[in-house]
Amino acid sequence: MNQRTVSANDYNDITDVAARYVEALRIGSVDMLADIFHEDSVTYGTANGRLMGGDGSPTADFIRNYGKSSEIVSHIDVLDITPSAAVVRVVTGNDAVGADCNDYLTLIKLDKGWTVIAKVFHQFDK
């Protein structure tokens, strides 16, 4: 059988979610994050060698604490995709605290479209 199970539109929709995530960081928009992350999402990662995160919205807390990341640069890779789940790597540099990070976003496709259900990140030493 030779059927495409995931369309090019799904890839575009997924990369759009990741791009909006980076844009939310760039402009410092907590409201935009609420449209990207599922209300039950979790975030965990390492920053300064320490585990941090949990449920709620650690990314929104980052924006509230440090403001916008107006000089941020990014690259987005779709690592894997199925008809209902995807994993995306977002490589960023120069966020609001001048850090470089790799973020791994796990997305799920619901009735309203693709949403981030989990984020795992690694902040590199400055």
Image: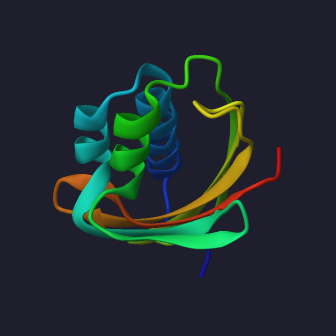
The foreground one among 60 and 41 is 60
Residue at horizontal 42%, vertical 20%? 27
Quadrant holding the N terminus = bottom right
The foreground one among 114 and 39 is 39
The foreground one among 102 and 99 is 99
Asked if residue 101 lies left or right of residue 126, the reply is left
The foreground one among 124 and 7 is 124
Whether residue 5 is visible to the viewer of this picture, yes or no, is no
Residue at horizontal 43%, vertical 44%? 62
Whether residue 15 is visible to the viewer of this picture, yes or no, is yes
What colour scheme does the image use? rainbow
Asked if residue 110 lies left or right of residue 64, the reply is left
Q: Relative to 70, does residue 16 appear above or below in the rendering?
A: below
Residue at horizontal 52%, vertical 34%? 22
Asked if residue 56 lies left or right of residue 28, the reply is left
Q: Relative to 68, does residue 102 appear above or below in the rendering?
A: below
Residue at horizontal 34%, vertical 36%? 64
Numbered circles on residues, count: 0
Can you give x and y, in whole percent of width and height, for residue 48 in the image?
A: 71, 60
Q: Relative to 97, does residue 78 appear above or below in the rendering?
A: below
State which quadrant residue 3 falls in. bottom right
Asked if residue 113 lies left or right of residue 16, the reply is left
State which quadrant residue 89 falls in. bottom right
Furthest-right residue in view? 126
Quadrant holding the C terminus = top right
Can you give x and y, in whole percent of width and height, for residue 54 in the image?
A: 38, 73
State which quadrant residue 75 falls in. top right
Can you give x and y, in whole percent of width and height, for residue 13 in the image?
A: 42, 44
